[in-house]
């Protein structure tokens, strides 16, 4: 590295002193710069590899699926909750639900568990709180619902480690993780600490939401997490009085993004009042009205997700 930098300085000095040799010197300068860039890239790669923690499985957990979004407010937590409930219903197996949104946990209220506190084992592990057949854990169980969490990145990473490895999950066939929006510390921590089986990306059809959803999908690809597919939430509004359909947030945007990135379209969820009301009241649509069209939409998405997750096992 030092020798190449010295050669680079000598070439620049020669170009000033002998301008008639400038074209030839420029050629050598380009090659030297390319070598410097390659060396710098290799050095950065070694530093990153040395600093990454080794992934380790969560005891008793077989499959880890993250539900993520690039932007907040697209209904990701609602989708995560109803997917987890649908997995338990379809597969007739043990399912866990982890709320990894340290700053804005939603799972306690959506699962009708607000105000409850987890007990601990003799070993100091948190015991998940159960409802509707799911084992749930959230930062919302550990802090007051109205108290803001004001933490820097390191504290967030420590909290994520606690939620992953400091919980007595028991034997779970699936652990669904509701991720916070964005591509920050939590996403990287989860991706680097545990073997994630796959990620589902949630977005509305709106252009501004799609920009961030695309970033989210690309981030998971960069860290080696398979993207199982994309969910288009709030796809269409059906007027309850006249039946007219309105594409309030645009039409088909998530499908176009899926085609652009060669991702599976897991399905659409309509913009329905019953979906919002049932989650706000702690009785998600897939348990409060499992025969409804809204619940069927979540079941379709879940079936498609499970197909993508286990497709390698069938080949």
Image (spheres, grey):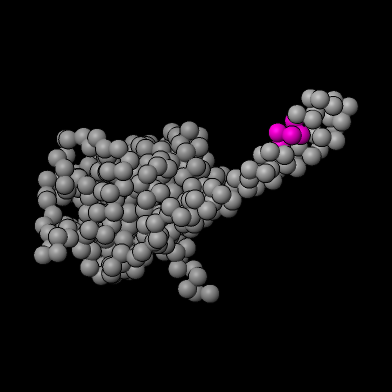
> As displayed, is residue 212 above or below residue 49?
above
Query: Residue 22, position in %: x, y?
Result: 84, 30
> As displayed, is residue 246 above or below residue 43?
above
Q: At 20% from the left edge and 45% from the top edge, which residue is drawn? A: 140
Q: Is residue 286 visible?
A: no
Query: Residue 219, position in %: x, y?
Result: 48, 47
Q: State the predominant SS element of the stretch in magenta.
A: helix
Q: Is residue 11 magenta?
A: yes
Q: Quadrant of residue 56?
A: bottom left
Query: Residue 38, position in %: x, y?
Result: 65, 47
> As displayed, is residue 149 above or below residue 45?
above
Q: Is residue 16 magenta?
A: no
Q: At 22% from the left edge and 50% from the top edge, which residue is drawn? A: 138
- Of residues 11 and 60, the one nearer the viewer is 11
Q: At 50% from the left edge and 70% from the top edge, which residue is drawn? A: 312
- Of residues 88 and 165, the one nearer the viewer is 165
Q: Is residue 25 visible?
A: yes
- Number of callouts: 0
Q: At 56% from the left edge and 44% from the top edge, which residue is drawn? A: 256
Q: Quadrant of residue 145?
A: top left
Q: Which residues lie in the magenta part?
A: 8-12
Q: Is residue 263 left or right of residue 125?
A: right
Query: Residue 139, position in %: x, y?
Result: 22, 47
- Of residues 183 and 162, the one nearer the viewer is 162
- Of residues 245 and 145, the one nearer the viewer is 145
**Quarter of the image with the N terminus in it:** top right
Q: Is residue 193 left or right of residue 145?
A: right
Residue with the most extreme right position: 20
């Amino acid at each position: 590295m030092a020798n190449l930098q010295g050669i680079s300085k000598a070439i620049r000095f020669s170009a000033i002193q002998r301008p008639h040799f400038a074209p030839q010197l420029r050629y050598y300068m380009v090659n030297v710069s390319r070598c410097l860039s390659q060396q710098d890239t290799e050095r950065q790669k070694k530093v990153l590899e040395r600093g990454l923690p080794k992934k380790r499985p969560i005891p008793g957990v077989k499959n880890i699926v993250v539900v993520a979004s690039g932007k907040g407010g697209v209904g990701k937590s609602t989708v995560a909750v109803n997917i987890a409930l649908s997995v338990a219903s379809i597969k007739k197996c043990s399912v866990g639900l982890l709320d990894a949104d340290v700053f804005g946990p939603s799972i306690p209220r959506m699962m009708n568990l607000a105000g409850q506190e987890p007990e601990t084992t003799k070993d100091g592990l948190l015991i998940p709180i159960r409802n509707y057949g799911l084992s749930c854990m959230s930062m919302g169980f550990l802090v007051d619902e109205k108290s803001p969490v004001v933490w820097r990145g390191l504290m967030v990473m420590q909290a994520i480690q606690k939620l992953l490895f400091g919980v007595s999950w028991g034997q779970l066939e699936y652990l669904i993780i509701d991720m916070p929006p964005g591509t920050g510390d939590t996403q990287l921590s989860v991706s680097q600490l545990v073997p994630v089986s796959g990620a589902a990306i949630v977005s509305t059809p709106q252009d501004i939401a799609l920009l961030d959803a695309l970033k989210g999908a690309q981030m998971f690809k960069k860290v080696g997490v398979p993207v199982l597919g994309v969910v288009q939430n709030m796809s269409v509004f059906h007027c309850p009085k006249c039946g007219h359909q309105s594409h309030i947030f645009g039409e088909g945007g998530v499908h176009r993004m899926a085609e652009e990135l060669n991702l599976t379209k897991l399905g659409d969820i309509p913009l329905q009042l019953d979906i919002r009301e049932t989650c706000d009241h702690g009785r998600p649509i897939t348990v409060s009205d499992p025969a409804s069209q809204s619940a069927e939409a979540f079941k379709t998405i879940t079936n498609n997700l499970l197909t993508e997750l286990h497709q390698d096992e069938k080949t």
